[in-house]
Amino acid sequence: MHFTHAITRLPADTFSQGISTANLGKPALQKAVEQHEDYVRALQLSGLTCMVLPPAPTFPDSVFVEDTAIVTNNFAVIARPGAQSRLGEIDEMTTILRYHFSKVHQIQEPGTLDGGDVCQVEGHFFIGISARTNQNGANQLAEYLKMHAYSSEIVPICEFSGILHLKSAVNYLGEETLLVDPRLADHSAFQKYRRLVVSLEDAYSANCLRVNEVVLVPSGFPKTLELVQKAGFQTTELDASEYQKMDGGLSCLSLRW
Ligand code: CIR
């Protein structure tokens, strides 16, 4: 999957009021802004044209733009975030995506779907059913994907406490390889792929992000870094500490196509 574009949004001064279960303390805004700058630079170095939206203080979690949509090369699906406080994030994103994509679909009530629950593996999509994404939302997305000749498969993750989204636990690195949380490593859906399994104590680092030639790895997880490198991938470490405090990982900070 080759990306040419990304959308990100700067964290707002309300960032620390977002939803969090991490118990790692409050994020420091200035540090979050600096980490965001490094993130955008990494996307640009990988050749992406990166749109950086201004902070949206009404929505403390709006820096996690990945949850607002699913984008591919030729169409977008506006999500319907499962957290009430995040629903309004889709309004501005809809306008932006309508500008970039001629085909834009939208998840409708009573469906809920967070983009973080959607993991694309070439022409196939895994859709997590979580506390944020319900069966109805997943079914709507599956229908849209089918219209565009993509296959999909639902992976319920509600039973795993502490896994917010599917992509908190499973990410596609390319070359038929998934980086997975040990709790999902033996799931039947993933058997046909090469699986790199992070240790449970490093579960956060299952959210690495492949961007063109490089895999972005959160810093502070040397075992995961080595695992990814030994599997033959080029890596770049990025500090995501302030986002981890708010349950967000590297993939959550952008929409990519
Ligand atoms: C939330 O709970 O919605 C945010 N604090 C974190 C969202 C992380 N997004 C993602 O994993 N795609």
Image (tube, rainbow, N blue to C red):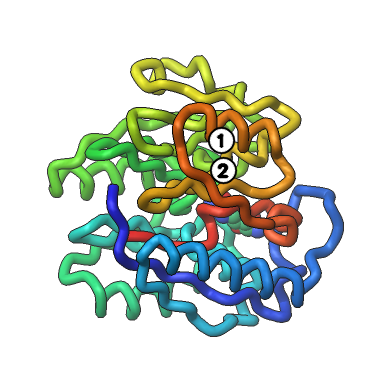
List x then y, in percent, for residue 165: 55, 43
List x then y, in percent, for residue 94: 35, 74
Quarter of the figure with residue 58: bottom right
Furthest-right residue in view? 25
* Residue at 40 percent of width and 29 percent of height: 177
Furthest-bottom residue in view? 54
- Tell whether circle 2 marks a residue whose Cβ is less than 8 angstroms from ligand 1: yes
The label shown at residue 169 is 1
The label shown at residue 45 is none
Question: Which of disc 2 and disc 1 is earlier in sequence?
Answer: 1
- Tell me which image quadrant ligand 1 sits in: bottom right
- Residue type at mark 2 is Asn
The label shown at residue 207 is 2
- Residue type at mark 1 is Ala
Residue 69's place in the image compared with 150, above or below, is below
Residue 31's place in the image compared with 248, above or below, is below
List x then y, in percent, for residue 16: 76, 69
Quarter of the figure with residue 178: top left
Residue 73's place in the image compared with 98, above or below, is above
In the displayed structure image, the side of residue 65 where residue 30 appears, left or right: right
Secondary structure at numbered mark 1: loop
* Residue at 72 percent of width and 80 percent of height: 13
Mark 2 neighbour density, 10 Å: few (under 14) some (14–19) many (20 or more): many
Mark 1 and 2 residues: CB-CB less than 8 Å, in contact?
yes
* Residue 133 in view: no
In the displayed structure image, the side of residue 103 where residue 193 appears, left or right: right
CA gap between label 1 and label 2 equals 6 Å
In the displayed structure image, the side of residue 14 where residue 74 appears, left or right: left
* Front position in the image: 139 or 231: 231
